[in-house]
Image (tube, coloured by chain):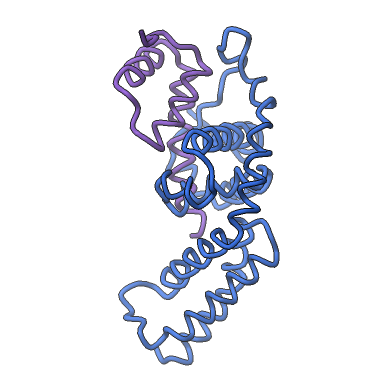
């Protein structure tokens, strides 16, 4: 059975992977549960989003 | 604008194109080749340029294709480097304790638009990308700058999809840490109220 309670390392991995491919339903659920409880991983999620946006503007 | 002035405008883009190509390819010769081929293609295609976009945008679009061509030519070398890079993941383990939780708080980066309105931010980001191991820098730019699908990236770099995701993960984490240290924790960082 898939684990619904994950640690920060696993959350960071899913935060990166979701930017490249759709996560499975239980991965999305585990990530949402973790992010509700973990401010630090929520910050990393926003950091990754800014990183992507900034990379798209590198040649401007 | 006449063809001569357009040609001059294209020629003046060379330093910008070279900077972008170096950043992507991490190899002076490959970068020079990609830029030369780009300038040649742009000059030859000038008559067909419809003016619907800026010349700069059009030429950078050509450069992206030339960079992809270089990746294809060098894919075997990239693949070997990629395998080496996959064995090097220890530095990132320091971010987490033995239960897998973060050891230190990441910095909140604030308003994205305010951050990206500062030119120095992009200089730091570029320096951080330059510090990445070459395969990680390439794969990050293929994904985030050239906006390739991961399936295309895997094919270009001759790595499995799992390895692709691992490399992108390592690139993002390293860049996040680098920006935390060199931009957001430093004097260049915007002040948050």
Q: If the image is split into quadrants, where does the N terminus of chain B sit? A: bottom left
User: Is B144 rendered above or below residue B17?
Assistant: above
Instruction: Tell me which residue sits at (53%, 82%) in the image.
Output: B40
Total marks shown come to 0
Determine whether, in the image, residue B74 is placed left or right of residue B108: right
Residue at the image position 51 percent from the left and 54 percent from the top: A58
Colour in which chain B is shown? Answer: blue
Residue shown at the point (49%, 48%) measured from the top left: A55
Viewer-proximal residue among A54 and B109: A54
Q: Write down the quadrant of residue B81 in the picture.
A: top right
Front residue of B84/B46: it is B84
Q: Percent position (x, y) of residue A4? A: 37, 9
Identify the image quadrant of residue B184. top right
Q: Is residue A60 above or below residue B193?
A: below
Q: Nearer the viewer, residue B137 or B105?
A: B137
Residue at the spot 59% in from the left edge and 76% down from the top edge: B36
Q: Picture coordinates of residue B80 (x, y %)? A: 66, 46
Q: Colour of chain A?
A: purple
Relative placement, left or right, of B192 versus B58 is right
- Would you place residue B107 above or below residue B182 in this image? above
Q: Position of residue B102 (x, y in %)?
A: 57, 15
Specify whether A37 is left or right of B134: left
Q: Which quadrant of the structure image shows residue A50?
A: top left
Vertical arrangement, residue B22 with respect to residue B3, above or below: above
Q: Position of residue A7 (x, y in %)?
A: 49, 12
């Amino acid at each position: 059975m898939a684990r619904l309670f994950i640690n920060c390392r696993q959350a960071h991995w899913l935060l990166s992977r979701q930017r490249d491919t759709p996560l499975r339903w239980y991965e999305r659920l585990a990530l949402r549960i973790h992010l509700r409880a973990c401010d630090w991983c929520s910050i990393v999620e926003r950091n990754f989003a800014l990183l992507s946006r900034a990379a798209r503007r590198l040649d401007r | 604008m006449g063809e001569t002035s357009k040609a001059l405008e294209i020629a003046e883009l060379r330093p910008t194109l070279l900077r972008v190509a170096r950043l992507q390819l991490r190899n002076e010769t490959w970068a020079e080749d990609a830029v030369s081929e780009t300038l040649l293609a742009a000059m030859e295609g000038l008559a067909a340029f419809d003016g619907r976009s800026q010349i700069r945008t059009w030429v950078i679009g050509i450069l992206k294709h030339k960079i992809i061509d270089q990746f294809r030519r060098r894919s075997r070398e990239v693949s070997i480097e990629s395998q080496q890079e996959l064995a090097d993941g220890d530095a990132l383990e320091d971010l987490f304790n033995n239960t897998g939780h973060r050891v230190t708080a990441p910095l909140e980066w604030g308003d994205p638009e305010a951050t990206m309105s500062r030119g120095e931010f992009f200089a730091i980001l570029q320096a951080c990308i330059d510090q990445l191991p070459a395969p990680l820098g390439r794969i990050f730019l293929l994904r985030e700058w050239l906006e390739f699908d991961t399936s295309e990236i895997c094919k270009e770099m001759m790595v499995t999809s799992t390895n692709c995701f691992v490399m992108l993960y390592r690139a993002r984490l390293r860049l996040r840490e680098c920006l935390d240290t060199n931009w957001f924790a430093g004097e260049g960082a915007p002040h948050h109220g």
